[in-house]
Image (spheres, grey):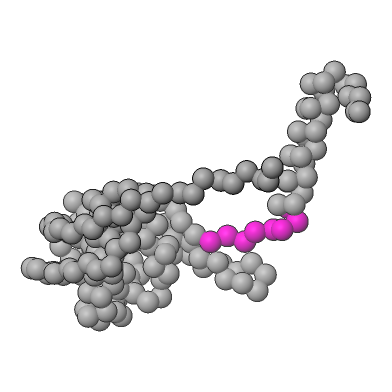
Amino acid sequence: MGPRQAPTPRTACRLASGSFQRFFDDILVCASTGVPEKLLLALEPWPLQKVIPFTQQALSGYLARTYDVAIDGGLAAAKERMSTAISEQVRREIGGDEQRVTAVHTMHFALTFKHLLLPVWLLTYRYGDKPFQLAVNAATGEVQGERPWSAIKIILTILFVLAAIALLLVLASGGEPQPTG
């Protein structure tokens, strides 16, 4: 008798179509190219209900970056974030374990924008020859960043944990070696 074969998975296919509306409010897009977007996205959410109108006095004594991404570039980035959220919602609405979505048609209405200055503390440091960046959401205290990893320390930690587990197993067995055979 040959090896046992795994059952062939069965798939039920069905066509799905439909429409839904999704309202987006305050899609944040970084308008500065000098800060990694990945770091800033990780700092969300921002307390946007506390945003105040811009005044020169609000920035007195602080260093602030101005935007260097044009409105068209910011709109494209916002549409990309909306598209990702819409795709995720389409897949949830369809349901099932796997979907093959061939087309999603999106229309945008009543688009507006506003410039915001959000409080971020930035730090870049060098370790060896490589720069690492940290960002702090100065409104919530959320910290995100990059850090150097030491391969030697990681390997030593793994070896220490394995040695501790082996010691615990020996102690749990009464300290006597178990006969084999």
What is the span of residues highlighted in magenta in the rendered image? 146-153
Does the magenta-highlighted stretch encompass residue 5?
no
Q: What residue sits 28% from the left and 61% below the top?
A: 87
Q: Nearer the viewer, residue 160 or 45?
A: 160
> Quarter of the image holding residue 160?
top right
Residue drawn at point x = 39 percent, y = 68 percent: 37
Q: Residue at x 80, y 33 (%)?
A: 166
Question: Which quadrant would residue 164 be assigned to in this image?
Answer: top right
Q: Please provide percent x and percent y for residue 22.
A: 15, 57
Residue at 22 percent across and 67 percent down: it is 104
**If the image is split into quadrants, where does the C terminus sit?**
top right
Q: Is residue 96 above or below residue 42?
A: above
Is residue 16 found left or right of 164 in the rendered image? left
Judge by depth and name the residue closer to the eye, 51 or 43: 43
Instruction: Measuring from the top left, give residue 7's x and y in whole percent.
Output: 51, 45
Q: Main secondary structure of the magenta part?
A: loop
Determine if residue 33 is in view: yes
Q: Which residue occupies the extreme left position in the image?
A: 110
Tell me if I can see residue 117 in this picture: no
The residue sitting at the top extreme is 174
Residue 152 counted in the magenta span: yes
